[in-house]
Amino acid sequence: MAIKFEDWQDVKVAFEVARLGTLTAAAEELNVHHSTVLRRINNLEKNLNARLFHRHARGYKVTEIGTKLFATAQTIHSSLEQLHNDIVAADSTLRGSLLLTTVSGFMDILGDVCEQFQALHPQVQLEVILEQKRLRLDHGQAHIAVRAGPRPDEGDYIAQHLAQLSSGLYANKRYINKYGMPKLLSDLQQHNFVSGVAGFNARVPYFAWADEHIPASQIKLRVSETAEATRAIIKGLGIGGLQHDVAAQYADLVPILHNELHWPTDIWLVTHHLVHRTAKVQAFAELLKTHFSKLTANQ
């Protein structure tokens, strides 16, 4: 029966354990949680139906079968390192295209960064891919990702914390003039809301809260894009959640129960280690870090 590798990332993680000798050292090297390393080793051994390590109190020792597998992994690792060096050498100038992926609602936040980058580096064609699904950086679908939520834990990715942004409830002044300003949480029972479609809400803190606390009959509009939720709130279709710095860009929006309801969200800059140090990626990353540090300072 042919051996089937369900996930090559499992091999990468197991190789680091073989190279460094402990789960903890491998987790630190890969910048992931200890439990992630253990899970991937267990997955690999299960898929191969073979034991790759002897577990000892002092660490992990490779078995005979593991030695054969990791010899091949070492060859792959060396080839990738050489590819990395070739990419850096070929991409040491600020030319060509740079692919950035994020969700649609983030363009209100990232617009200034994109404008600065284009002004500073006119020979780079910046392409922004707005997708709710996560594109694979290791497949070249994008060079940089700006993600919200828990820390990304893919082994070959480099995740840098940019900021923790906060969101709250907002409504258009026209809506408030028509339906009144909620003064208490109980007042929300008399209002209309904008939220997300099924399967999308878990990734957006406000949408998850609305699903739990607001009756379905009060959610008058559901959208599949955060940018569309923003537009709906601006149009006065209901109360909805917005990042505070996004809401501040619209003079007709007013906060609702600002002290009672707010949701923090961690924002991450994610790159693949093979292109992390290229000139284009580093140039855009530095602008991102500066921009988010200013946003955090102004919160």
Image: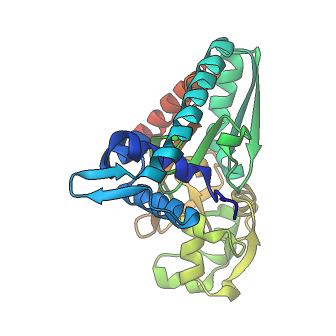
Quarter of the image for the C terminus: give it. Answer: top left
Closer to us: 151 or 220:
151
Vertically, is 124 above or below 142?
Answer: above
Spot occupied by residue 25 in the image (x, y as percentages of width and height) = 32, 44
Spot occupied by residue 195 in the image (x, y as percentages of width and height) = 67, 71
Vertically, is 226 above or below 100?
Answer: below
Q: Quadrant of residue 283?
A: top right
Quarter of the image for the N terminus: give it. Answer: bottom right
Vertically, is 36 above or below 278?
Answer: below
Q: Quadrant of residue 208?
A: bottom right
- In the figure, is residue 197 to the left or right of 171? right
Spot occupied by residue 236 in the image (x, y as percentages of width and height) = 73, 65
Query: For the point 76% across and 42% down, which residue is it?
Result: 129
Query: For the point 74% across and 51% down, which residue is it?
Result: 131
Closer to us: 291 or 38:
38
Q: How is the image coloured?
A: rainbow
- In the figure, is residue 56 to the left or right of 205? left
Q: Is residue 165 visible?
A: no
